[in-house]
Image (cartoon, rainbow, N blue to C red):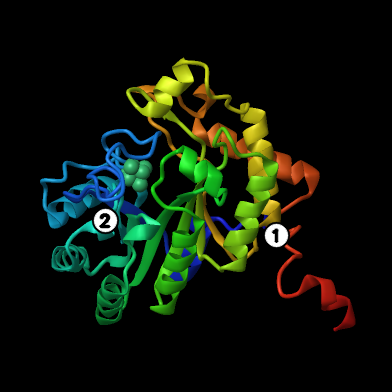
Amino acid sequence: MLYNVYSDYLKNRYGEKVYKLPVGLPVTCPNRDGACGSTGCTFCGEIGAGYENLPADMTVNEQLLTNKAHIKPKYKAEKFIAYFQNFSNTYLPIEKLKNYVEEACHEDVVGVALATRPDCVNDRYLEMLAEIRKKNNIDICIELGLQSVNYHSLIKVKRGHTLAEFLDATYRIKSYGLEVCAHLILNLPWDDTIDVIENAKVLSAIKVDQVKLHALYIVKGTQMAREYEAGQLELISREEYIERVITFLEYLNKDIVVQRLIGRAPESNTLFSNWKTGWWKIRDTITKTMEERNTYQGRLCNYLNGSAVQKYL
Ligand code: SF4
């Protein structure tokens, strides 16, 4: 196994193909509405991460049915994960979120994924989600935007939280029997290979369940776009991104499921997006290079559980 591929994991866990259906809610983000910031992260466009979503004024039920009607015949899929994708979904009032998640628990929905920020994770919400999980016999995964363990970079992109909130949120989520998926951007302009390795080591040490990797894309009209146009940002090459992903995987615990090696960035409205290369081409180059080098996820994951004293055991 080169790496722990998400689609294989889903097939093993649920016995057949499972597809994620995006659902958009009328929600914002505390880093945009003034609670902890008013401008958002410097790379964030107006629509958050949810550019694939249907309009958020459609009900959860309508969105799921519309997406299912499209996906079911195309991929012959019978089981689904409802993915609340945009902005910070656990920033909604608790009763509203409860109703939305319950509405998504269709018979053929085996899991719910909720994207949010580490500083929007709270015990009361987790207790509510744990109850829904138990009652409906589904899996619930909280997808946390971390982007980098380098807390200096997090300040530069105006995340409004640092590594500490991510660690706190992860421990809390796991204590309620829910899963954690961490989102990372492996090419933030201030990060280098040391940060990439530390990303893998921290995620392995705190036992996140899944990880999703992205390459930075620069959306027009954002602060990062202005910095990019002013020549203030230096972005690594596509080849260097490929090297970083391979290094990240080598240090990552083999049990962590990898949802993506690179995001499907929107091409319109961007100044920079995946080096103008299809995401699948970059993914294929990564896997081909790993095969040629005879390397794999977890090959260098030899730093946990008191590695220095293991020679005495
Ligand atoms: S946390 Fe997410 S939605 Fe909020 S400003 Fe940052 S990228 Fe945008």
Q: Residue at x 66, y 39 (%)?
A: 192
Query: In this image, 162 relative to 141: left or right?
Result: right
Residue type at numbered disc 1: Gly
Picture coordinates of residue 114, whole percent (x, y): 32, 59
* CA distance separating discs 2 and 1: 32 Å
Residue receiving disc 2: 89
Comparing 105 with 303, the one in front is 303
Residue located beneath label 1 in the image:
298
Is residue 15 in sight in this rendering? no
How many residues crowd around disc 1 within 10 Å: few (fewer than 14), some, or many (20 or more)?
Answer: many
User: Looking at the picture, how far across and down is residue 260, in whole percent?
Assistant: 51, 48
Give ligand 1's quarter of the image. top left
Question: Which residue is situated farthest in the top direction here?
Answer: 230
Q: Relative to residue 292, is residue 138 drawn left or right? A: left
Residue 150: numbered disc: none
Query: Looking at the picture, does residue 26 appear above or below residue 175?
Result: above
Q: Residue at x 62, y 67 (%)?
A: 205
